[in-house]
Amino acid sequence: MSSDGDEVDDEDAWAAAAAASPSDPPIRGGLPPDAVASLKQSIDAHLRANNIYETVRGIVGGFLSEKQLDFSGEDRVIKALHEKGVIDDIVTALGGGTAVSRPVQPHLPGRVLPNRRYLVVKVRPGRDFVEQVVNESSSGSMLTLYVQFGHQRFCSRPVIAQATPEFNEVFMLDLQSVGSRSRNPAMVPLAKVLHVRHRLHATLVKEDIRSKRREVLSSQHVEWRTVLETGTKSLCLELLSRRTNSDRSPIGLIDLELEIAPSPRPGATGAPLIDPSVIDKQIALEQSTTSANRRRFHSYAKSWWNDYLQIRPDHQQRVIKMFACNEDDERVFVCTFLRPIHCSRILPTALHAARFVRLIPLHVFLSRGYGDVEDHCALLCSLLLGFGLDAYVVCGKKHDGPHTWVMTRESKTRAMFWDSCTGRTYAVEARTMANDLAEKLPFVSIGCLFNHRNFYANVQEDNTARATQWDLTDPMQWKAMTADAIRVLPGCPPITLAMNPIDPVTAAVQLEHSLYDMIEDYRRDNLQAETSWDEHLSHCISPALAAYESQCVTGVSYGNALFQESIRHTIPLRFAFKAFPCQFDHRESGKILAHLLQSKVAVDILRTMSSFVHFALRVHIVPYAENVAATWVILGVKWRTS
């Protein structure tokens, strides 16, 4: 994890202190008091997050109960701490070990920063998980718990699906970053923390070990602010099933331990840090305000819809989608699903963002494990908004029925359509499109469009995609909802995307070796033939894969002349050459070979027999955000023709 240049790395500070010998001259003036206090806070938070205080108290208490402490008692306690591994745990925690679970997002530090307040969430082993969660898969399953707090996202290590799944995680949630972007702000007071409205969002996902199929078992929101009463709080999270809208039966329990770090000073004479009645009143006020705003908006939306139907009779048949179900099966306004996502350090351009969304299969969607066209469009639109584009989700029709896609508006007459599932873009210009271009356009009509701030319904008599005008300020073309009515609705929390953790070179080499073995076995079993590989030819065909991926991103082909020249110089006279490229959104060698065997060209290559035949293989992996990557495979062969 990288940090800002002016943030002090506690790990570096400890390393520098350990490296200094007694003969080294002291640093002039020493550390300022603020720095000392910040360092103490960092150490305190590390020790609390790893239960070091509790462990030490238990060991020391054992000595005291046995009255074993004498003049050598200090040495005996330290020896006991060493034997129990406590000292090693402290060193691991302060040295950036793995005791604290890694965050999913790239910007949250993996260590505690000075002058910041954290919410420590300790996830304990689950219990009482129902049988269908544990025994549904014959090949076995793994469970992963995802936690989101504002723009911060974390995931647990996968554990075996069983009646008592062995979760044991510590998540460090930065309370400062929710309301401040300053690099070194002052410690936020607890009274201000009380007004942080983001709840913890816990999502439990099960993944089948063999098929890699992922399923969301439960999605729960947790109100955490009750921890502000004493600084610590234990919660039992009851996970409810999401199998159907009507079936919300419990599937298991997970115990959570919450703690504010650094530990706040206790109130006078044991008084609470914040009176529980104040906490309850604040939460109730927020819920009441949200409910009132939603009721007013629903009343406004109903009136707005009736007015829209009065404009033209055929408006009843247009695709106008104002509400959709969220993860809690609540019907919410569609604008609240969108929010600009800033990810230029991971996805450098809007075209890379579109490629990233395209690579997410319809059955895999970030930590949720599934997604549909609307989910893809919401993600793509949010990414394009983050790049400063005037982006909207469009609801309309294709030739085969209702459909959703994304649009960026360039002017009052020009727009760009983005198909989130294919990655293709279509430039449209109202009433001036050539007939051949209009015929290639897969979108037929447009009903409405929306982003995080605005909602517009198409009132133009000709609502075909090729004829629609894009002057959103013209009430004769578009009926808009008032921005003020939309603004009061609670939106989705900010989201950040994580860097892909894979090493693309290592992963490519591993996949190549696996395919080498499988191809050799295939030829040996089916043709009784050995397989000879040409490493130089494999290297020469590699640039084609980079060119293919670049073309998928930009739509522009490059490097073909150089590739052709390379092949001409590599393939000798009286030899022929053939190659077959393909792209996947996974890295499973068995599925890749099965795909090759379904292609006539690939099978012809694999079954090539000659007195002199050499094969070539190259894998090229291009990582995007999260765990999404494009996997390119090219299989080639050269053989003597005479």
Image: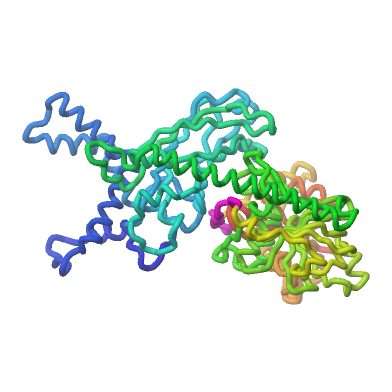
Task: Give the image location of residue 631, x and y in percent.
Answer: 67, 56
| Image quadrant where residue 553 sits | bottom right
Residue 46 or residue 595, whichever sits in front:
46
Q: Left or right? Give the position of 291 relative to 93.
A: right
Task: Residue 502: say if magenta.
Answer: yes
Image point (58%, 38%), residue name: 219
Residue 496 or residue 321, whichever sits in front:
321
Q: Left or right? Give the position of 37 relative to 142.
A: left
Count of all numbered marks drawn on residues in the image: 0
Determine the main secondary structure of the stretch shown in magenta: loop
Task: Residue 539: say if magenta.
Answer: no
Residue 563 or residue 410, whichever sits in front:
410
Location of the C terminus by quadrant is bottom right
Image point (71%, 58%), residue name: 481
Outermost residue, left side: 71
Provide the residue span drawn in magenta.
489-505
Task: Give the image location of residue 181, x and y in percent.
Answer: 44, 62
Residue 227 in view, yes or no: yes
Task: Give the image location of residue 17, x and y in percent.
Answer: 22, 59
Task: Give the image location of residue 260, x and y in percent.
Answer: 36, 44
Q: Left or right? Give the position of 528 relative to 64.
A: right
Residue 209 in view, yes or no: no
Residue 381 or residue 440, whichever sits in front:
381
| Image quadrant where residue 15 sits | bottom left
